[in-house]
Amino acid sequence: MPAHRPRMFHELAPYYDALIAGKDTAAECRSLEALVGRYGRSPGRAWLDVACGTGRHLAILRRKFRVVGLDRSAEMLRVARRRLPGVRLVRGDMRSFDLGERFDVVSCLFSAIGHLATERELLRTFRTLASHLHPGGILLVEPWIDPEQFHPGFVHLATSRAPPLTVARLSYSRTRGRRSKVEYHYLIGIAGRGIRHVTETDVGLLVPRARLLEMCARAGLKARFLRRGLTPGRGLLVGQKPARGLRGRAKPGARRIVRTPPRTARRPRSRPMSEAPGRSSARPRRFSGDRSDRRP
Ligand SMILES: C[S@@+](CC[C@H](N)C(=O)[O-])C[C@H]1O[C@@H](n2cnc3c(N)ncnc32)[C@H](O)[C@@H]1O
C-alpha cells in the first residue's frame, strides 16, 4: 500500500490512543492534581483541558472535577465523545476561543501548544487561556522540546502494540529556522485487515523556556517552569492567575525557573520522552513491552 499523508491528528485519530499506550495517564493526572493543590488558589473544581485530543486526561480528571474539553480536530473529538458521554466537548482553536465561563484549572498537555506557528500566536493563546481562569486559578502547559534539546538529523524508532493494532513509527528530525520539522512514517498493522503506511510531518515552534515564561507573564500570570513535569525532557509551565485584588498585575520577580520541582506521582510506564524525536540522548531501540510514546 503506498504511503498516505493525513492531516495531523485527523486520520490518525482512531489510532492515537494505541500510539501513546505507553503513557501513564493516571500518573500524569495525579501529578497535575498535586500541582493544583500546591499552586492553585481558586476554590472550585472546574477544569478545562485545551487541545484535549481523545480526552484521555479528562476521563480520569472527571472523577474529581467538573471537566470541559476543547480541541480543533473533529476526529479527535469524535473519539473523546465516545469516551466521555455527558461531558462538554467543544470544537475550537486554542488561539481564540471564548467558552463564556471560567475555570479553576486550565491545562494544555503533551506539547499541543508546540503546534502554533509563531510567538505572536503563542502570546495570543496564553492570553486566551488566562482569560478562562478564575482569579487564583492555575494554568498547566506542557511545552514542546526546548530549542537547545532538539537535535536535527536524529532518527527515532518507536513501536506499540494494543491489539488489534500494532504500530511501528520511524521519525526523522530537522529544523528550519526556529521550527522543528519531524517526519513520521507509521506502519499500522490491524489484525485481520492488513497493514497501512501513513506519513505525517509535524512542524513545531522551538521556544526557549525563558521566553515562554515571559509570554505567560505578559498574559497576566505569575509563571514558573518545572523542569520535571509529566513527559521527561519537556517540563511543565505553571501559571497562576493572581487572586482577586491582584488581577492583571504580573510581578517582574514572578518569573522563575524551578530547579527542584515536585516529583511526578510515578514514572510513566512508557519509555521516557527523552527518546522523543529530535533529542540526541535518545537511542533508537525496541520498547520493552512493545509500548511507545509519540510526539503529539
Ligand atoms: C498530541 S495531541 C494531545 C492531546 C492530549 N492533550 C493528550 O495529551 O493526549 C495534540 C492535540 O492538539 C490539538 N490541537 C493542535 N492545534 C490546536 C489548536 N490550534 N487549537 C486546538 N487544538 C489544537 C490537536 O487536534 C490534537 O488533538
Image (tube, rainbow, N blue to C red):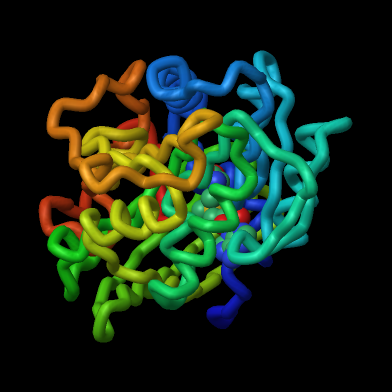
Does residue 194 lie above or below 84 as drawn?
below
Q: How many marks?
A: 0
Residue drawn at x 70%, y 43% is: 69
Residue 58 is left or right of residue 41, and the answer is: right
The picture places residue 97, in percent across and down from the top left corner, at 70, 60
The picture places residue 59, in percent across and down from the top left corner, at 67, 28
Does residue 173 lie above or below 110 as drawn?
below
Quadrant of the image occupied by residue 60:
top right
Residue drawn at x 17%, y 75% is: 153
Camera-side residue of 214 and 281: 214
The picture places residue 64, in percent across and down from the top left corner, at 66, 14
Determine if residue 187 is in view.
yes
Quadrant of the image occupied by residue 46:
top right
The picture places residue 146, in percent across and down from the top left corner, at 22, 58
**Ligand 1 shown in quarter:** bottom right
Residue 126 is left or right of residue 158, and the answer is: right
Does residue 37 lie above or below 287 as drawn?
above
Residue 198 is left or right of residue 246, and the answer is: right
Quadrant of the image occupied by residue 24:
top left
Q: Residue furthest front?
A: 245
Residue drawn at x 27%, y 72% is: 173
Determine if residue 286 is in view.
no
